[in-house]
Image (cartoon, grey):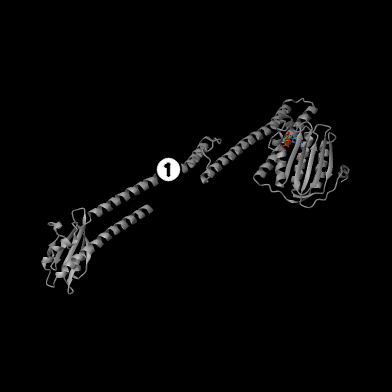
């Protein structure tokens, strides 16, 4: 568009300047003739003797000159006109009769035009004749025509170049988007989330960012789907084994009528504990899924952590009985902002694990100290420990370091995932250190809500409390 505008302007400027120079020259020559003729002109008319000098005065073979009298009769024609006559249309004749000069174009030797300048010969305020000087526009028209053609070719070329370049550029720019669409379609059709949009060269523009984001999203989706798939498989597996035990025991009980009472009681006890495990598993799952969907807001209040610690410690002692030596080694009076029930659950899960994975005669130490802005709870056991390769995974759902043994120990494989989620929901941290065969130490850091009253609570104090 801009190109056409510029081209149009160039063309009209060139045309105007060419015509302007022709008109200027015609006027000059025309006026020269008028002056010459005027020398001898009278009110009655133009005497002829001077006319033959006109040609000699102008010295221009390209210039056509014609003189008419006031009746429009041609009284002189330059020799180069041969038999032709430069017409003088009525309106211009009238204009000349009114004493005004002017220009007009005449069709002449098609397709070339003749540019004509006419001027009146005035004597005593009366037009006694009219001078016409003309020049063929052939050369100029050819130049202008050539210019027009060249401009047109230039436009066509520029247009083709712009269109081609634009097509190529958009094609290049849109190629990654086409590939992304194809990838998305292929994923929809095949359900194969491992496909990615190919990245040939790293682009640092919006499209590059889009492709990277798209691929990252696919990474995350794939990981999520895989996690989900494993999770469903794990749940089915976790629920199937207690159900198998329960159903097996029930059919045995139904068939064997003469079972000794003791054996019957054992079987019923086994059914009960398996059912309890399923119950625990389902409650844990519910808690985790609520946690994930953000539906489980904590009931935050100021909680005296040391009290909860002492409660958990007593519960653990009762649960372990004489089997283990459980000690409360330190309890600063720490107040945190948290959900008391959930914090109790954290401690119960950690202590239950310590009890579960520590062989008879082992020791568990429980402590709470303040460290700067943190309340630090430490649960240390002399149990079986966790292998280094298992350590990074123990907070994953259903992860068990020793599959058979830990399931037999009654765990659901969800305890530590719940602990980690709860601690983080309290804006805390959890760390673990463990040596296989020597024991494990779990450490929880929770932000203090109030300055801590550091005071040592010995085991005897805790007993007395
Ligand atoms: P589980 O219900 O199986 O105990 P958890 O999520 O509580 O599930 O723990 C995950 C795994 O971490 C356990 O199966 C066990 O292998 C290991 N583990 C957790 N606590 C201890 C501990 N105190 N000593 C040794 N191993 C532990």
Kindly state the secondary structure of the residue where label 1 is placed. Answer: helix
Q: Residue at x 57, y 41 (%)?
A: 216
Residue farthest to the bottom? 124
> Residue 118's spot in the image, x, y percent?
20, 64
- Relative depth, front residue between 116 and 344: 116
Task: Tell me if residue 183 can be seen.
Answer: yes
Q: Is residue 378 above or below residue 56?
A: above
> Residue 377's spot in the image, x, y percent?
78, 43
Q: Classify residue 314 by image quadrant.
A: top right
Q: Residues within 10 Å of mark 1 (few under 14, many from 20)?
A: few
Q: Looking at the image, how many numbered discs can be counted on the residues? A: 1
Q: Is residue 163 above or below residue 410?
A: below
> Residue 399's spot in the image, x, y percent?
69, 34
Quadrant of the rendered image holding ligand 1? top right
- Relative depth, front residue between 299 and 395: 395
- Relative depth, front residue between 36 and 83: 36
Q: Is residue 100 left or right of residue 295?
A: left
Task: Tell me if residue 91 can be seen.
Answer: no
Q: Residue at x 13, y 58 (%)?
A: 79
Q: Is residue 286 above or below residue 270?
A: below
> Residue 3's spot in the image, x, y percent?
37, 52
Q: Is residue 426 left or right of residue 152?
A: right
- Relative depth, front residue between 203 and 438: 203
Q: Residue at x 22, y 62 (%)?
A: 104
Q: Is mark 1 within 8 Å of ligand 1?
A: no
Q: Is residue 48 left or right of residue 443?
A: left
Q: Which residue is mark 1?
A: 168
């Amino acid at each position: 568009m801009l190109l056409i505008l510029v081209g149009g302007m160039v063309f009209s400027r060139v045309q105007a300047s060419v015509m302007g120079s022709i008109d200027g020259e015609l006027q000059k020559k025309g006026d020269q003739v008028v002056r010459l003729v005027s020398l001898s002109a009278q009110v009655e008319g133009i005497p002829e003797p001077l006319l033959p000098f006109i040609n000699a005065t102008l010295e221009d073979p390209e210039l056509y000159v014609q003189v008419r009298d006031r009746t429009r009769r041609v009284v002189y024609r330059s020799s180069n006109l041969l038999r032709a006559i430069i017409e003088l249309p009525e309106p211009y004749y009238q204009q000349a009769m009114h004493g005004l000069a002017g220009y007009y174009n005449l069709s002449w030797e098609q397709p070339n035009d003749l540019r004509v300048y006419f001027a009146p010969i005035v004597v005593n305020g009366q037009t006694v004749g009219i001078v016409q000087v003309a020049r063929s526009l052939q050369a100029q028209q050819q130049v202008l025509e050539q210019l027009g053609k060249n401009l047109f070719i230039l436009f066509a070329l520029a247009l083709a170049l712009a269109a081609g370049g634009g097509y190529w550029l958009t094609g290049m720019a849109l190629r990654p988007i086409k590939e992304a669409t194809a990838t998305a379609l292929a994923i929809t059709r095949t359900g194969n989330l491992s496909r990615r949009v190919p990245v040939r060269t790293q682009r640092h523009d919006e499209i590059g960012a889009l492709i990277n984001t798209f691929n990252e999203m696919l990474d995350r989706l794939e990981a999520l789907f895989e996690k989900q798939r494993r999770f469903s498989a794990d749940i089915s597996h976790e629920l199937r084994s207690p159900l198998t035990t329960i159903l097996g025991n029930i059919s045995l009980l139904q068939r064997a009528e003469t079972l000794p009472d003791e054996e019957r009681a054992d079987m019923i006890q086994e059914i009960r504990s398996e059912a309890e495990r399923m119950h625990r598993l389902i409650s844990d799952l519910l808690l985790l899924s609520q946690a994930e969907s953000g539906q489980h807001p904590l009931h935050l209040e100021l909680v005296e952590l040391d009290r909860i610690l002492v409660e958990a410690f007593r519960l653990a002692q009762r649960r372990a009985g004489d089997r283990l030596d459980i000690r409360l080694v330190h309890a600063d009076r720490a107040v945190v902002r948290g959900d008391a029930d959930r914090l109790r659950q954290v401690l119960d899960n950690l202590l239950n694990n310590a009890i579960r994975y520590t062989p008879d005669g082992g020791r568990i130490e429980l402590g709470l100290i303040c460290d700067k802005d943190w309340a630090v709870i430490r649960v240390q056991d002399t149990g079986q420990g966790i292998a280094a390769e298992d350590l990074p995974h123990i907070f994953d759902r259903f992860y068990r370091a020793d599959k058979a043994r830990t399931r037999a120990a009654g765990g659901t494989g969800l305890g530590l995932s719940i602990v980690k989620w709860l601690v983080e929901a309290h804006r805390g941290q959890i760390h673990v250190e463990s040596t296989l065969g020597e024991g494990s130490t779990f450490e929880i850091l929770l932000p203090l809500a109030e300055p801590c009253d550091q005071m040592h609570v010995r085991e005897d104090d805790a007993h007395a409390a």
